[in-house]
């Protein structure tokens, strides 16, 4: 049976939740993203090759995606040009696109300037604006 993108993201996010259970309560709540950010802060102290960075970015990114989807809805799409998924929330009334892999990578490479809870607050604000303004579109990167 062929897996689809949604199943892969859910499976990866649940693996992240299980594998890092000793680092926080990964219950897919918005508040749990602070624990994700704490882990990424720790990881920023280590040198990683591109393959390891991509692996960490996809695992933590899938968890962030699932926090967004479980709390705000949406569907996953694969963006070939970026070689990563996007979550699109609000259609057909509005459209908020969320890219998580690049943000996780940025958090590891750039430090606190790519703070995950702040980034996610931007997503929440965009969704709230979309709910008030039909046709509103935004991309959160």
Image: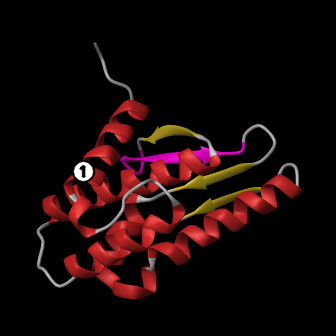
Q: Residues within 10 Å of mark 1 (few under 14, many from 20)?
A: few
Residue 137 is inside the magenta segment? no
- 86 sits left or right of 97 in the view: left
**Residue 59: x, y in percent?**
28, 54
**Residue 16: x, y in percent?**
27, 53
**Residue 83: x, y in percent?**
36, 47
**Residue 14: x, y in percent?**
32, 45
Q: What are the residue bounds of the magenta stretch?
A: 81-90
Q: Dot 1 corresponds to which residue?
A: 18
- 114 sits left or right of 57 in the view: right
Query: For the residue labelled by badge 1, is the local secondary structure a helix, a strand or a loop?
Result: helix
Residue 84 is inside the magenta segment? yes
Majority secondary structure in the magenta region: strand
Residue at horizontal 44%, vertical 65%? 32
Residue at horizontal 22%, vertical 80%? 42
Viewer-nearest residue: 83 or 48: 48
Viewer-nearest residue: 48 or 16: 16
Task: Name which quarter of the figure residue 58 lies in.
Answer: bottom left
Residue at horizontal 62%, vertical 43%? 73
> Of all residues shown, which one is farthest toward the right?
133
Residue at horizontal 13%, vertical 80%? 46
């Amino acid at each position: 049976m062929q897996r689809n993108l949604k199943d892969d993201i859910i499976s990866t996010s649940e693996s992240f939740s299980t594998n890092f259970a000793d680092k926080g309560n990964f219950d897919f709540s918005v508040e749990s993203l602070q624990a994700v950010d704490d882990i990424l802060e720790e990881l920023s102290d280590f040198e990683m090759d591109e393959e390891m960075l991509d692996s960490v970015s996809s695992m933590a990114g899938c968890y962030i995606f699932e926090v967004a989807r479980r709390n705000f809805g949406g569907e996953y799409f694969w963006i070939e040009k970026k070689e990563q998924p996007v979550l699109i929330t609000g259609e057909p009334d509005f459209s908020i696109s969320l890219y998580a892999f690049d943000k996780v990578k940025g958090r590891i490479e750039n430090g606190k300037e790519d703070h995950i809870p702040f980034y996610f607050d931007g997503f929440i604000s965009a969704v709230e604006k979309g709910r008030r303004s039909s046709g509103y579109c935004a991309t959160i990167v």
